[in-house]
Image (spheres, helix red, strand yellow):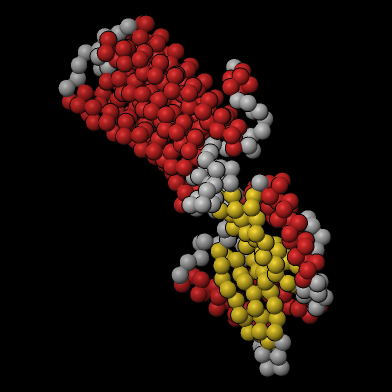
Amino acid sequence: MINFFIHKFVKDYEKIENAQVRTSYGVLASMIGIFCNVLLFAGKITVGLVMNSISVMADAFNNLSDAASSVIGFVGVKMASKPADQDHPFGHGRIEYIAALIVSFLVIEVGLTFFKNAIGKIRQPEDLTFSLISVLVLLASIAVKLWIGYFNRILGKRVNSTVMLATATDAMGDVITTSATILSILFYYFTGINIDGYVGIAVALVVIWAGIGIAKDTLEPLIGEAVDPEVYRLITDMVERYDGILGSHDLIVHNYGPTRSLASIHAEVPSDVDIEVSHEIIDKIERDVARELGIFLVIHMDPVAIRDGRTAEVKKSVAAVVQEIDNRLTIHDFRMVDGEQQINLIFDVVVPYTYQGKELTKLQLNIIEKVSALDSRYHCVMTLEKSYVAEVETK
């Protein structure tokens, strides 16, 4: 059924890199979300009023907020598709993140409202009216929400949409809350004990937690998150595969929306090669990355003396010393300025974010001490810097 909707309503659905096609995916997801959630709200609010159940009504208004979220998602996707202009040369893609953030606030607000109502229900409990038809309506709503969640997750992953993935997460939260509501109704039917208020609190907390999760996922690209390790490998592998490039470092990626990224990287080139030759290679890489990866890449050239055997040996020795201190440390931009009484070793050290304050100073002194032990004439002129790449979590 998902493929039917995509093929029916998304023209050129396979060209997901096209901004208009991506917008069509967003419009499709929003319209289906609005229709389904309004339908679920109507069914659940009727059941809630008939049964006098705060947990069912909370679930109903949660669906209404989901419909409002779909409207916001629709507006956000349409606005994010606007082309770049004089005031916004990088486009309007981040509007989609802002739309997802507004969705998260709506979800949290609904959860807080019904948390308050559930507390009142516990203080002044009211009898429930059991209805088999009502339970069947709620079970049907679970099936619909499962499908909406799956639908948005498939589309969200296909076009890398934060709003759709947030909607998918919210839908799965709705499945949990509706399931809890059904359990409370069945518990009352078989035991006569009314736990509707307590389940209402649980439902509200799940809704609030889902909203917080959506906000967190949305804020990260807005604040500026580290480069994904897979993206890092993709870009660096492509840059380093060209003849004339010895290595790369200091990759930074700036996100201006799901379909627009700008990046900069330092590429090491042989110092004895004509600068115009190296520049031509750099230009070709930038064009190829833009065409193949859709990333606007700016490359800074770092000349490296590859035929200076002594510099290479000293660099190798310094790298070994740094690795001995902490195997997470790496060096780059190594240069050596020779002298009779003092030999300046100029290099950068990439350190993990776990090094802060006094630990950084201690690390720097430790490197200086150990490098000086190799040769008393060595004088370290180093810069400690942090990586822009997200660390891979190890289990």
Residue placed furthest toward the bottom: 341
Above or below, 71 against 40 in this view is below
Above or below, 113 against 383 in this view is above
Q: Residue at x 19, y 20 (%)?
A: 125
Position of residue 280 measured from the top left corner of the image (x, y, whole percent): 77, 62
Snapshot quadrant of residue 364: bottom right
Q: Residue at x 64, y 28 (%)?
A: 13
- Please name whichever residue, 301 or 217, is drawn nearer the observer in this view of the structure: 301
Q: Is residue 200 visible?
A: yes
Position of residue 265 measured from the top left corner of the image (x, y, whole percent): 65, 60
Q: Is residue 44 left or right of residue 77?
A: left
Above or below, 40 against 206 in this view is above
- Looking at the figure, which quarter contains the N terminus? top right
Residue placed furthest toward the top: 132
Residue placed furthest toward the front: 86
Q: Is residue 381 left or right of residue 355?
A: right
Above or below, 119 against 382 in this view is above
Position of residue 345 measured from the top left corner of the image (x, y, whole percent): 66, 80
Q: Is residue 159 left or right of residue 176?
A: right
Q: Is residue 198 left or right of residue 70?
A: left
Q: Residue at x 65, y 55 (%)?
A: 297
Q: How many marks?
A: 0
Snapshot quadrant of residue 176: top left
Q: Residue at x 66, y 46 (%)?
A: 294
Q: Is residue 327 visible?
A: no
- Please name whichever residue, 320 or 88, is drawn nearer the observer in this view of the structure: 88
Position of residue 195 measured from the top left corner of the image (x, y, whole percent): 27, 20
- Please name whichever residue, 218 or 345, is drawn nearer the observer in this view of the structure: 218
